[in-house]
Image: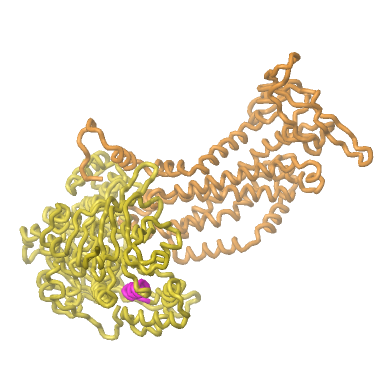
Amino acid sequence: MTASLPAGADSPLPPDVVVALRVGSASQWRLMWWQFTRHRLAMASAVVLVLIYLLAAFCEFIAPFSPTAFNPRYTYAPPQRMHLFDRDAAGDLVWRPHVNGFKVTIDPTALRRTFVIDDTVKYPIGLFVPSEPYDMWGLFTLRTKLFGPLNKGDPMYLLGADRLGRDMLSRILYGTRISMTIGLIGVTLSLLLGIVLGGISGYYGGWIDHIIQRAIEFVLSLPTTPLWLGLAAAMPTTWPPLWIYFFITIILSLIGWTSLARVVRGRFLSLRTDDFVTAARLDGAPESRVIFRHMAPSFVSHIIAEVSLAIPGMILAETALSFLGLGLQPPMVSWGVLLQEAQNIRSIATAPWLFAPGVAVVIAVLALNFVGDGLRDAADPYHQ
Amino acid sequence: MMTESDKDIVLEVKGLSTWFETRHEVIKAVDDVSLTLRHGKTLCVVGESGSGKSVTARSILNMIPKPGRIVGGHIILHNSSLGWSKGGPVDLARLDPKGRQIRGVRGREIAMIFQEPMSSLSPVHTIGQQIIEAIRLHRRVSHAEARAHAIAMLAQVKIPRPEQSIDSYPFEFSGGMRQRAMTAMALVCEPKLLIADEPTTALDVTTQAEILDLMKNLQSLYGMALMFITHDMGVVAEIADDVAVMHQGRVVEQGPVDQIFFAPRHPYTQKLLGSVLALEKRSRRALKAPRQEGGEIILEVENLGMRFAGRKRLFGGATGQEVQALDAVRFSLRRGEALGIVGESGSGKTTLGRCILRILEPTSGRILFKSRTKDAVDLAALPMPAVKPFWQEMRMIFQDPFSSLNPRMTVLQIIGEPLRNYGVASGAEIEDRVARLMQRVGLPPEMMRRYPHAFSGGQRQRIGIARAIALRPQLIVADEATSALDVSLRAQVLDLLLDIGHELDLSYIFISHDISVIRYMCDRVAVMHRGRIVEIGETEEVCENPQHPYTRSLISAIPKPDPRQRGRAGRIRYEPEGAAGS
């Protein structure tokens, strides 16, 4: 770029000058956004994540059934296929979404019930169908679901049914809310701890740094699974589910803050010696302004990236704890709780759809990791 | 029919174009470049940063970083001893960049030396292992033979005690020794062409002189062609036979060194030489307004000492080695005076500048500073909070125009920061004053809402200057303020500093490793060596008639941008007692 700009806006600028002008007055966040959008996988994952959190937010409305509604006629019913078209009496294709019914046969020797899809029985389904009244966000009562069978009581198990004949799809959707938020809340807690302790450690250095770092090493040296087990076992069984939920997040973040504290400390240490921080001190900026106005903007982006990489760890930890029966307890529904059902060999053999919550975990964790990756690449738009 | 002069040709570059294609644009890093490299001759490729010199060198070896690629032209290697070419000419541009054939050329026919000897040697292998590997990649010899050959090579590049040094790791070597080892490695297979990409830029000037001597000797011994890439016209004058001047990816002029220096035809060459020669004498601006004698002394440094403590071991064990960075430094500075501080890396000049501002804590001595209103105060004795108000009157300009400006603040915020923090101005007044400051340093004020990354290196340094003068200080410590700039920008920035200095009656402490910059700018100069000031005096006096042996060796090592004076002035070597040379 040249020192003097072409005078007057009427002279057409060459395209590279336009780009340079646009980039030149772009703030850090805009540059980061440009960088992030270049990471295709991260962009796609971000869309997936937004969808997942939308599902979590509106799960009451989207889930076709209540997570606790059961039907003993359909225990371990396999997933049905959704058909969108049907043939009318004349044999022409018409728009009529439906699912097929089941034919139940009983194996005479093993006395095992087997479901066979019955093509002759058709249960029509549709959008915005009436349902049992339910609470939306605990605020108001609704009587309409996004989709479901048109006639109340018709079976619709798009992802199959579990041991009590409950709809897996509805339960997974409800589980999304718990599992995806437990990560957010847990990370927020560890972030607070990590920023405060890591910031103190990095900025002041010396013996304070020494003590905090040794404390971090101590926490990291504790074997996590037994610690979680112990803390979870100490939780009174009489507690209401919401308390248990918060207690679990606290347990998870007690371990999680250490890595964030290290990241924050590292940023502080490397920035402290940067010339522009020295310049800020010489410019008479008070300590607080040096930290919050000059240093903080250059590591906030890194911390966001680090946080988005920490959430999957939280989700996996919750899933693991609940799978072992030590985390959340039924009737709360999380992906880990749902996976408890898939603990025995029988489910692998006869009802593999019980693993569907595991697929949900994989999708969510991968999406978060890819987004975190993209954010990390975009976090520093000035050094490439 | 080949003529006699054609037989000398080792490598011909014809119409080479290397482009970097990104999604938005095509950068023509090298555009239709033609060069000829002859047996036993040195071709200097000279140009400013971004002119495409390094990409040209890498194109010859077909090692271009992505997304660059050779889009046209030929690189013809003559008389190669490669088996598959049967001695005929080979077009390197046509070879697969990852193929076996080009690998046979690299290192054996054409070798390369890089700028940064630390990062181009592997830190986990000994020097010997790396040289022996280079030998055995291209020749079928036993390990013992290769080792003997490596030792002989190390002796040839004048590494002391080669039998022992061969088993050293690169970190045990100094910068100059590492560059010698790199040279030895490049020459083990007796290449026909040696490409040296700014091999002396990271080195001190005395070490640079040694390496240049070495290269000349080796060339006369082996007779290889040398392609020497540099931005320093002094180095060109010292070693070139032919010169190619590059500008924006093109060779704008090429010819014998004498013709380039004394009859340059292209305007860019003339401009480049002009800015180099401008730095060869005192600035006219500095002469125009001679400093008034007997001005008031504003800074007096007495017996300043600074030790970097060695690392303390855990549990209070023995401490590591202490480093005496400053040792009884004393000088005084008058109002309106520019004092240069010159020295090689590690001489303590940066530490001195930072101690005066109390960014670093001196361990002994006094720093008497007289502000405009008050009497002289000893800064070294003040507690930290009491030093802060003095930072309005003592400002700093940093070396690196990239890291010294916060990339996340606009220019308005950066220049306005001292005004705001010291309560000099607020609100719209800040904007006004920043606009005037930007105008003063030659930047259009309309650009104040841009971020630093929109500016070039020279412009950023101007932003740094505007920030430094915002508070109308009395003293500016400029630490290598022009070292990161291209030579054509240096004189401009120095002139700006001189003009502002006269306007504001400023004193400068100007720290640099480059004596030409100091001669241009400063009234007096202090020469530092190992934490001490070994000589201080009028700049002309010290440059023309140096008294201390170290100053003499320093001055004699500076390459003069005049090929006709080559080898006239003998080199003087300074060996302080008990110290090993480079």
| Residue situated furthest front in the rendering | B1
> In the image shown, does B62 or B444 lie closer to the viewer?
B62
Q: Is residue B340 above or below residue A156?
A: below
* Residue B257 in the figure: left or right of residue A332: left
Q: In the rendered image, is residue A131 in sight?
A: no
Q: Dividing the picture into quarters, in which one does residue A68 lie?
A: top right
Q: Residue at x 43, y 72 (%)?
A: B138
Q: Which residues are magenta?
A: B173-186
Q: Residue at x 34, y 57 (%)?
A: B59
Q: Residue at x 74, y 26 (%)?
A: A99
Q: Is residue B452 above or below residue A54?
A: below
* Residue B292 in the figure: left or right of residue A263: left
Question: Residue A165, how many percent across, how many down?
Answer: 80, 34
Chain B display color: yellow
Q: Is residue B164 above or below residue B277?
A: below
> In the image shown, does A287 or B39 lie closer to the viewer?
B39
Residue B396 in the magenta stretch? The answer is: no
| Residue situated furthest top in the rendering | A90
Question: Residue A226, how many percent across, how many down?
Answer: 69, 58
Chain A display color: orange
Q: Main secondary structure of the magenta part?
A: helix
* Residue A198 in the figure: left or right of residue A342: left
